[in-house]
Amino acid sequence: MTGSLLGCANISTPSGGKRDATPPRLLKVNPGDSLLNARVSRVELTFDEYITLADAQKEVQISPMLSIPLTVSGVNKRVVVKLTDSLLEDNTTYRISFGKAIRDLHEGNPFSGYTYTFSTSGYFDSCRLQGQVVNAATGAPDTANVFILLYSNREDDSAVIKKKPKYITKPDNNGIFRFGGLPSRNFRIYAVKDANNNLIYDGGTEMIAFCDTLVRSQDSATGIVLRLFAEQADTTLKADTLKSAKKPTVAKGKMNRQQIDSNLVFTTNLDTSSKAKRTFNLTDSIKLVFNRPAEINGNKVALHFDSADVAVNRRVRIRNHPSKPEVFYFVADLSENTVYTLDLQEGFATDTGKKQAASGKYVFRTFNNDDFGKIKLNIPAKYVSSKSGAGTDHSDHLLMLLADADTIYYQKITDTVVHFRRLPPANYTFRIIVDKNGNGSWDTGDLLAKRQPEFVVPGGTQLTLKAGWEHNIDFESKPKPTMKKSGFSDKIPSKK
């Protein structure tokens, strides 16, 4: 007997092979690249495959810039750039950079790194400028949406707020910027954190950096440091503005909470979800934030814990925020791993209209000593302020300690060693502010007043602190911590 076996084959889509990762290849440029004594008005690039353009208005740039932008178009395998040759200056080298605008049609692989060059003279400019841009408030590199701008030395100081520059470049991820192919002359140089990409400093949320003097391009690159800062907002109102104001204005999409909420309400930084969970930092103050300015009656605020079923009161010191009348701090000496009750009795807080906040009780537990870490920070003697209040350069120096984005220590440096004894686990960074005017805070700059921001020296590295560990580190170098389990014995946190 003869039998047959019948089976069904699996049907699948044929594999297309490996993805094409090859960018378009440039076959021809007309007119030819690197022309001398030329006034080019049209450049045509021909490629070996069909192409498309991506964000050409931003990616394709001519340097030095022209008052009328380039016209860029792409059809089939060709890209055409048109420029107004009547705007070209004599004895000038022009470079058209294409960025990553040109891509193959199907896979989007960019044709990058190409620059078309021509000169209206018999030579190519070859001088350079190099430097770094940093955030003035942190001392660290700042690169997002940052452009470095060069203006002619014949422009006045306000050119950056009125017109586009002659030359632009962008910094790399380390804040390093480079200009090449410059003429040998003086320039005004700026950096702008450009929110709207118009290559002009518009103030507001944008940041600016400038050099105190003119800079000169050289045959070898020179080092320039530009420190970006946000100018102080002008909050003053003109008299005529006040007279014409018939009613308060409210930002679009927001409501004035005081108008819609007649009750005096507040929030706190206490976590009362579970008294079995340690949630409150011994070095913190209890913070109350009201919806409008308020007054606190200290006789109706009580803080206590239970000891052998007997309530033991803790003295509470009430402090108002120096510039925010709606913010209050309750300061008390707290013990570790202890359940406290904050009792806010009826009438403890009233507003100017004598409306009272609701009473309430808040039960929370403090951290244990082993929940904290320690840092011993060694600071170079050059940053230590003298007893007269002046450092070695006649400036005070302020130490900032930041836990992630929060500033938890901000004091004048008076010793080469600073101990931080109770720090919650976090990522810590250090900064030193050169407080030139001795006002105890960092001051930003002013472009038109030609005032630079105060210097900030960043610490050597970021330190990850874990519970129960201690580190001994130097401010200027990467930490080589000696980490061990801490035998904390102090019951009251050190108030630095």
Image (tube, rainbow, N blue to C red):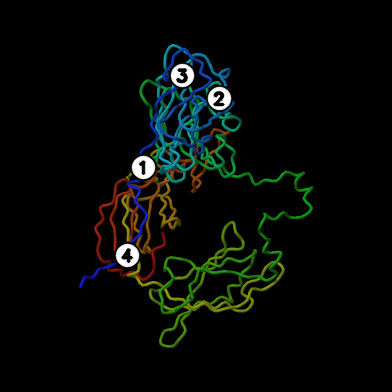
Residue holding disc 1: 20
Front tag of 2 and 4 = 4
Dot 1 or dot 3, earlier in sequence: 1
Q: Position of residue 128 (x, y in %)?
A: 40, 24
Q: Give the residue at x 72% y 43%.
A: 238
Check the image and report above or below for 15 versus 26: below
Label 1 sits on what residue type?
Answer: Asp
Front tag of 2 and 3 = 3
Q: CA distance from mark 2 to mark 3?
A: 20 Å
Q: CA distance from mark 1 to mark 4?
A: 34 Å
Front tag of 1 and 3 = 1
Label 2 sits on what residue type?
Answer: Leu
Residue holding disc 3: 31
Dot 1 or dot 4, earlier in sequence: 4
Front tag of 1 and 4 = 4
Q: Secondary structure at mark 4?
A: loop
Q: Give the residue at x 70% y 66%.
A: 260
Q: Pointers 1 and 4 in contact (CB under 8 A)?
A: no
Q: Is residue 388 visible?
A: no
Q: Secondary structure at mark 2?
A: loop
Q: Is residue 429 left or right of residue 84?
A: left
Q: Is residue 162 left or right of residue 407?
A: right
Dot 3 or dot 4, earlier in sequence: 4
Q: Position of residue 64 (x, y in %)?
A: 50, 24
Q: Dot 2: within a 10 Å radius of its alpha carbon, few (fewer than 14), some, or many (20 or more) residues?
A: some
Q: Is residue 102 visible?
A: yes
Residue holding disc 2: 66
Label 3 sits on what residue type?
Answer: Pro
